[in-house]
Amino acid sequence: MIEMNLAIALKATHAAQEKARSLGLAMTVSVVDESGRLVVTMRADGTGFMTPESSRAKAVAAAAFRTSTLKLAASHATNPFWSGVPTITRGEALPTGGAVPIIIGGRVIGGIGCGGGTAEQDDICATAGAQAVA
């Protein structure tokens, strides 16, 4: 059984950063393990000062709920539970667009979250990172 480790996290982070650069974005990328523990955060020059915290919290939400945070954000309209998640988790999980689970062998081993662009741009970069290690 494959577990999240630094090598996997770095490969995913570098792929997400490469995608961000190709889009002309300064991005912060965070990877957590399946329990939401931080493995790595990489902040590009020129990113916003809150992007390390938001990218990590997005990654935690993707790992915890085992789905894209774009899907979680879309659930706000139909299920008010999601708007309370940041309060319930004391800011540790942020169900807003920009993170996806990292899945290897059909099992969620962590999450990757990005911050620095729009929710859709962050999601594109996170997806590139997750696909690089899938």
Image (cartoon, rainbow, N blue to C red):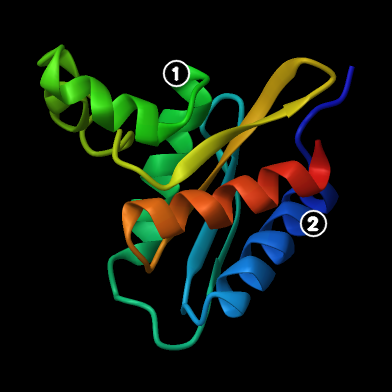
Work out whether residue 59 or residue 73 is closer to the camera in this orientation and state it: 73
Residue at image mark 1: 65
Q: Which residue is most to the right?
A: 1
Left/right placement of residue 133 relative to residue 77 reads right
The residue depicted at 26 percent of the width and 28 percent of the height is 74
Q: What residue type is labelled 1?
A: Phe
Q: Residues within 10 Å of mark 2 (few under 14, many from 20)?
A: some
Whether residue 88 appears in this view of the structure is no
Quadrant assignment for the C terminus: top right
Task: Establish if 67 lies above or below 81.
Answer: below
Q: Position of residue 128 (x, y in %)?
A: 66, 52
- For image coordinates 26% across by 32% down, the residue present is 73
Residue under the point 44% across and 56% down? 122
Residue 94 x %, y %: 29, 38
Spot the residue most to the bottom.
46
Q: Can the viewer see residue 111?
A: yes
Q: Mark 2 points at which residue?
A: 11
| Image location (x, y in percent) of residue 21 | 59, 79
* x and y, in percent, of residue 96 in the image: 29, 40
94 up-or-down from 88: above or below: below
Q: In the rendered view, does 79 fall on the left or right side of 13?
A: left
Amino acid type at circle 2 is: Lys
Q: Tell me the SS state at disc 1.
A: helix
Residue 46, picture quadrant: bottom left
Number of marks in picture:
2
Q: Quadrant of residue 41?
A: bottom right
Q: Residues within 10 Å of mark 1 (few under 14, many from 20)?
A: some
Q: Which of marks 2 and 1 is nearer the N terminus?
A: 2
Separation of marks 2 and 1 at Cα, in angstroms: 23 Å
Vertical placement of residue 108 versus 44, above or below = above
Q: Is mark 2 on a helix, strand or loop?
A: helix
Disc 2 vs disc 1: Cβ atoms closer than 8 Å? no
